[in-house]
Image (tube, grey):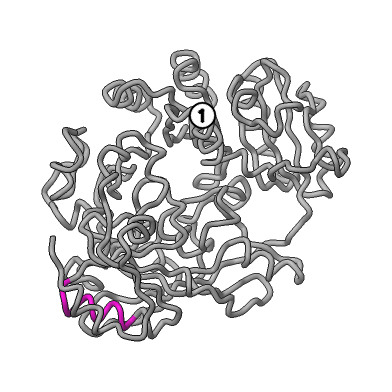
Amino acid sequence: MAYDIAALRTRLAGIRLEENPALVRQRSRDFYWYSPTLKRQLDAVTADIVAFPTTEDEVVTVLAACAALAIPVTPRGAGTGNYGQAMPLAGGLVLDLSGLNRILEISPGRVRAQAGALIADIDAACRPGGQELRLHPSTYRTASIGGFIAGGSGGVGSITWGGLRDLGNIIRLKVATMEAVPRLLDLTGEEVQKVAHAYGTNGIILEVEMPLAPAYDWVEAIVGFDDFARAAAYANALGEQDAILKKLLSVIAAPVPQTYFLRHRAFLPDGQHIVLVMIAPMARAAFDSFTARWGGRLLFDLDALGTQETKGLPPLYELSWNHTTLRALRIDPTITYLQTLYPFPNQLDLVAQIHAELGDEVPAHLEFVRFDGKVTCFGLPLVRFSTEERLEAIIARHEAVGIPVFNPHRYTLEEGGMKQTDAEQLAFKRAADPAGLLNPGKMIGWDHPDLDVADGRTYLFAGLDGAAGAA
């Protein structure tokens, strides 16, 4: 795919650009290598050029120039996504939004920031007023707020606040369209779902307004159990204790913690299945009583440790969500993972069933959340990878017993879990990106509206099939 990059360069005079192949390749990547399938399919993907705008006007200039020259644009935040959301399948221009990083306004219960602002920086600015973001990914210290909204779904805080799809967890988005004369749109209420978790396929998020919650010096604890089912039941029951304010509730089966959580290894006896807990300080006594009632063993209590004992320890949320997988990958590069949902009200039975069947090959990792108002859990189990065929069989087995898989080994919106095209997102793309230049290849409903995405076949964007090898 050849584009008139020379003409683009002329149109973008005054805006920082990068064409060094090594640097362009680096900015064309995210954490796609979590998946051996995506690593095979996407390893050769790279853009032709990267633009680094620092103002909304510069973003609009880039979009208008690319629209005029029919050059595709793939937006990028911090590049911490896990399944190729920010990778330019059709080449063209990567739009690096990290320069739009200003925090614009903080008021009671809300914050307004540019899309490239880091989540940790937003919280640091809000904390003097006793506030913090409700939700964040485990990549808290490196992820941008716009990238989280465009590519994420929930994370730390979801046990209390649900996910980004829940009304009220995103207040407002300012979005630029991909047209000859780009428009700036304000989306609120239900409208934000048109571009949330759409990978930037139908609009460039420029600015976000998010709700805030009271900030606390969260208590970090690890509770151990001899029996995995008991650990999961304890976490589920603790999730239902609404008067105990929680930020994190994760269950990880042995021997995963003992093998991969190296800095916490001294606190993790062999054979202990663990529950990671972050609770508000005023709930400490209630938490201790509840844990004693369940026979849980307090393995780690950050508040009880001295400075020397805690030196070098990562925050507890960096053992949870996708950081669990990251820590395993650092030690064993053959590890991969799944993303699953255990539907309410049978979540514990489903967890027990699949763990009994596949627990050695697919060690369990649960994240308890509020989902449609009910306490249940997502799974991010590790997978001891052997072949892609076996990986597909494991996915099929989960779905056969009633455990939906949001497939992290696919790069399209539909194959990643929707199983169908989001009609509202597709309609918005037709209006906001009529030439289909935004992040091509990520929305099957745009490229092949008649394709059955639930038939089990892998979709490969044109041009990737040869480069990626047989699917």
Where in the figure is residue 71, as x and y percent of width and height? 19, 70
Where in the figure is residue 399, as x and y percent of width and height? 34, 28
Where in the figure is residue 14, as x and y percent of width and height? 36, 86
The secondary structure making up most of the magenta span is helix
Q: Which residue is depicted at the point 61% across and 79% down?
A: 105
Q: Which residue is depicted at the point 44% across and 13% down?
A: 357
Q: Which residue is depicted at the point 58% across and 62% down?
A: 119
Q: Is residue 173 left or right of residue 447?
A: right
- Relative to 348, is 190 above or below? below
* Amino acid, disc 1: Gln
Q: Secondary structure at mark 1?
A: helix
Q: Which residues are magenta?
A: 60-70
Q: Nearer the viewer, residue 91 or 419?
A: 91
Q: State the residue position of label 1.
A: 347
Quadrant into which the N terminus falls:
bottom left
- Relative to 97, is 47 above or below? above
